[in-house]
Image: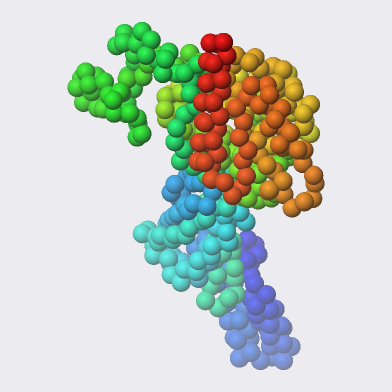
């Protein structure tokens, strides 16, 4: 009874106080009719509170999110199934789900009458604008009576996770020899001594070359299978992502850091779909995602790792060893001075393929801080034999990638010419 009375609203408490005062007056004045009225006035809020508290106990809810992984700027639908298992009908139900600010406003629903056993279905959509691991919930219900005398709040469902992954751009083309960890043309090495004995097969993925279909395995398994040469997996490509706060400009979804993360995700998925073994590391060499076997990790592993990635506060690049371990390297770098880039260059041999995308962070900033001279950084890296391209916010990622592929081809030509000389 004490728990039921705790749900009385201000109106209910005032009505209860008025009933008690009327009962006291009826005793003093010896008015039996006033006593009858006071008994009714006192009993009404008590009875309503008790029935509302009982109706609260029988509520259950379930939340479903489709899809549970959505890109920035996308849309996810949330379905709430609420049902009542109690014997009493439930009415005057206010349902509110906890939604972070980055996903939009908090949805609120008013259910006039909740059917017993069958329940009702509620739906709303979220439009995430920021990357990250977001939590939906808890789902709370506020139960009131038609008179507004009692009000109870109950948590119907705990939190559910929604993964907001970075946008992925569609890329085309590959740098010459990409994935082999060397500077020579990949087609030369693939065609040398290639045959059925050096090949493995895997299920067909969208975008695979139909010329690589292994018809014998396709006939045996009744499923489209493609041939994957084993040699390319011995090299691989390392993607280095610079996620220092000091290296980027801008805020929110339009910041240079978000562009770099989205570009890293696009490159990883593009190379992986072309059968390349990839490793994703930070500027300090910390491994985020790595292929340890035959490169069969799911793309969602890369997207989840980048969705949860948070910027670090260190000022300069901390390169103490070759982040690619002698293999091919694609570095996505923000603002960096000559000393920081010099550390990266010193740990890379000129015979190893090294490509870099330098972000012109001044184009993302508001003039609050002067970034290092990116053109000087481009000259420094090119002088060390790197293939370099400059990225700006108005340039599509597909064009930046195409420019990077062309720099890789030019580097191959230079190395072949030098070898001939």
Q: Which residue is drawn at 64% across and 21% down?
A: 385
Outermost residue on the front side: it is 421
In the image, residue 200 sits, relative to residue 386, either above or below, namely: above
Q: Can residue 26 be seen in this view?
A: yes
In the image, residue 219 sits, relative to residue 249, either above or below, namely: above
Q: Report whether 116 appears left or right of 346.
A: left
Image spot of residue 72 (x, y percent):
54, 48
Q: Which of 126 and 120 is in front in this view?
A: 126
Image spot of residue 356 (x, y percent):
62, 30
- Quadrant where the C terminus sits is top right
Kindly indicate the quadrant of the structure image that contains residue 11. bottom right
Q: Nearer the viewer, residue 111 or 354?
A: 354
Image spot of residue 55 (x, y percent):
49, 63
Q: Residue at x 72, y 49 (%)?
A: 365
Image spot of residue 211 (x, y percent):
28, 25
Outermost residue on the left side: it is 219
Q: Which residue is drawn at 60% across and 27% down?
A: 387
Q: Report whether 400 appears left or right of 89.
A: right
Q: Which residue is drawn at 61% across and 91% down?
A: 33
- Quadrant where the N terminus sits is bottom right
Kindly indicate the quadrant of the structure image that contains residue 344. top right
Q: Which of 287 and 61 is in front in this view?
A: 287
């Amino acid at each position: 009874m004490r728990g039921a009375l705790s749900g009385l609203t201000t109106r209910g408490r005032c009505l209860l106080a008025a009933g008690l005062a009327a009962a006291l007056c009826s005793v003093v004045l010896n008015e039996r009719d006033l006593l009858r009225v006071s008994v009714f006035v006192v009993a009404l809020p008590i009875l309503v509170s008790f029935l509302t508290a009982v109706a609260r106990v029988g509520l259950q809810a379930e939340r479903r999110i489709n899809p549970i992984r959505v890109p920035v700027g996308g849309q996810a639908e949330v379905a709430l199934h609420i049902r009542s298992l109690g014997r009493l009908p439930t009415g005057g139900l206010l349902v509110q789900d906890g939604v972070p600010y980055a996903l939009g406003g908090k949805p609120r629903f008013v259910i006039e009458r909740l059917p017993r056993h069958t329940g009702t279905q509620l739906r709303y959509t979220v439009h995430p604008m920021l990357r990250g691991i977001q939590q939906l919930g808890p789902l709370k219900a506020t139960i009131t009576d038609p008179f507004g005398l009692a009000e109870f709040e109950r948590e119907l469902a705990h939190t559910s996770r929604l993964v907001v992954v970075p946008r992925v751009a569609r890329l085309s083309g590959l740098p010459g020899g990409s994935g082999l960890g060397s500077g020579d043309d990949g087609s030369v090495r693939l065609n040398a001594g290639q045959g059925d004995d050096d090949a493995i097969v895997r299920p067909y993925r969208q975008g695979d070359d139909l010329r690589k279909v292994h018809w014998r395995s396709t006939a045996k398994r009744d499923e489209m299978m493609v041939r994957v040469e084993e040699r390319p997996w011995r090299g691989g490509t390392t993607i280095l992502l610079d996620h220092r706060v000091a290296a980027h400009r801008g805020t929110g979804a339009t910041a240079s850091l978000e562009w770099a993360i989205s570009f890293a995700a696009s490159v990883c998925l593009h190379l992986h779909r072309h059968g390349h073994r990839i490793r994703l590391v930070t500027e300090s060499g910390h491994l985020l995602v790595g292929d340890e076997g035959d490169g069969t990790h799911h793309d969602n592993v890369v997207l989840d790792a980048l969705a949860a990635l948070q910027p670090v506060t260190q000022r300069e690049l901390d390169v103490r060893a070759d982040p690619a371990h002698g293999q091919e390297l694609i570095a996505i770098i923000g603002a960096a001075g000559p000393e920081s880039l010099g550390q990266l260059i010193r740990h890379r041999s000129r015979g190893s393929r090294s490509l870099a995308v330098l972000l012109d962070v001044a184009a993302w900033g508001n003039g609050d801080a002067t970034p290092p001279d990116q053109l000087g950084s481009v000259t420094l890296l090119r002088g060390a034999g790197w293939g370099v391209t400059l990225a700006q916010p108005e340039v599509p990622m597909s064009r930046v990638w195409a420019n990077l592929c062309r720099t890789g081809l030019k580097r191959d030509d230079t190395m072949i010419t030098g070898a001939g000389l």
